[in-house]
Image: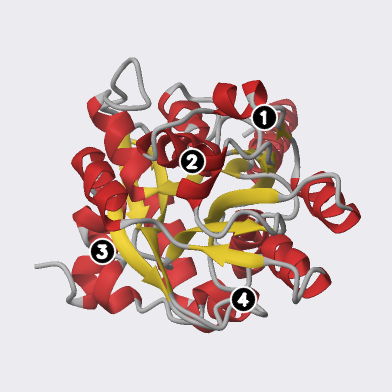
Amino acid sequence: MTRKAWKGVLLLLAVLAVGASGIGQAEAAKRLQLGSWNPGSGWYVYAAAMANIVNNAKVGVQMDALAKGGAIGNPINVGEGKYDAALTFSIAANWAYQGKVAYKKAYPNLRGLIGGMDEYYLGIVTTNPKVKSINDIKAQKIPVRYVTVPRGGLGQWATEAMIEAHGFTFEDIKKWGGTVTHTGFSVIASRIKDGQADMFSHTVNPGHPSLTQIAIEKRGALRFLGVDDSVRNELTKIGFLKETMPANTFPGQTEPKNTFGFTTAMHVSASMDNETAYKITKTLIDKISDLRAAHKGLRTFKPEKTAWREEQMGTPVHPGAVRYYKEKGWLK
């Protein structure tokens, strides 16, 4: 080969090397977005921990935890390709998959990676001395000052459904001289602490940062409320689960409270490639001790019992996750 030809070969190899380097950098820079909920929520703590676990594992997948989304909004965000993955409740994922209850259209491309991660409850609290039960609000037309999260989360949606099942609405509260405010957790905690609000309900898990803060700051003045069985039976018709929040789930909550239960699942789109879905699932489950250490609500997560079950996700399981669960021997 002539010297000129050799120069041509070397130049071609140099060009290919630069190109390969550029491709590698582009691939390394590609990141996945994981939707959760607002700062101060348990889910944001979950998502931040999950992203940290995946990123530190260096398996070729990088994740960013987003402090936004919500249980109702996240299935839409994943279904429409706005987020690569997201946390939601299995009940919301199932509604979205079928296009019912809180959803005007179906999102049949939703797929589950991990299910049954925890136990959430509809926690209902008040500092209003006149409110001994939720029925008291309607019976006495008590002008409570209700605070709840912005629209998009199941906490807000479940709160409205619960109140309406008791025979009144947010509009009724306003007519009786009360107020209803949709805002973030930091404002909710501040308003209850300062006496600007006296009632709050939300889907919470053990150790939920905001309700824990409220319970500590208002200990002695805060009352935890339960839900009548007639109301619980009514809402099971749309998929709510009857659960009892154990005593001492939160500071000052000395008695168990009958309410509703929900469980967290991670969802992606059916368009996510199998290898990426496999890596995310395997990394998070293999690092279960790190995941449990991230939040009190995850301490009882037993993936061998719940993570792989379709009913704990509310949608079909992604093939990449199926591969991992079969390797573990959990899914036959």
The residue at 25%/50% (across/down) is 230
Above or below: residue 170 compared with residue 112: above
First in sequence: mark 3 vs mark 1: 1
Numbered disc in front, either 4 or 3: 4
Give the labeled residue for mark 3: 308
Q: Which residue is mark 1?
A: 12
Q: Quadrant of residue 196?
A: top right
* Lower sequence index among marks 1 and 4: 1
Residue at 67% across, 79% down: 251
In which quadrant of the rendered image does the C terminus lie? Answer: bottom left
Q: Amino acid at mark 3?
A: Trp
Q: CA distance from mark 2 to mark 4?
A: 28 Å
Mark 1 secondary-structure assignment: helix
View extreme (left): residue: 332
Provide residue 214's location: percent of width, then percent of height.
76, 64
- Separation of marks 3 and 2 at Cα, in angstroms: 45 Å
Residue under label 4:
250
Q: What amino acid does circle 4 point to? A: Phe
Residue 46 or residue 151, whichever sits in front: 151
Q: On the rendered structure, is 225 left or right of 182?
A: left
- The label shown at residue 32 is none
Residue 273 visible in the picture: no
Q: Residue furthest top?
A: 104
- First along the sequence among labels 2 and 1: 1
Q: Position of residue 120 (x, y in %)?
A: 46, 62
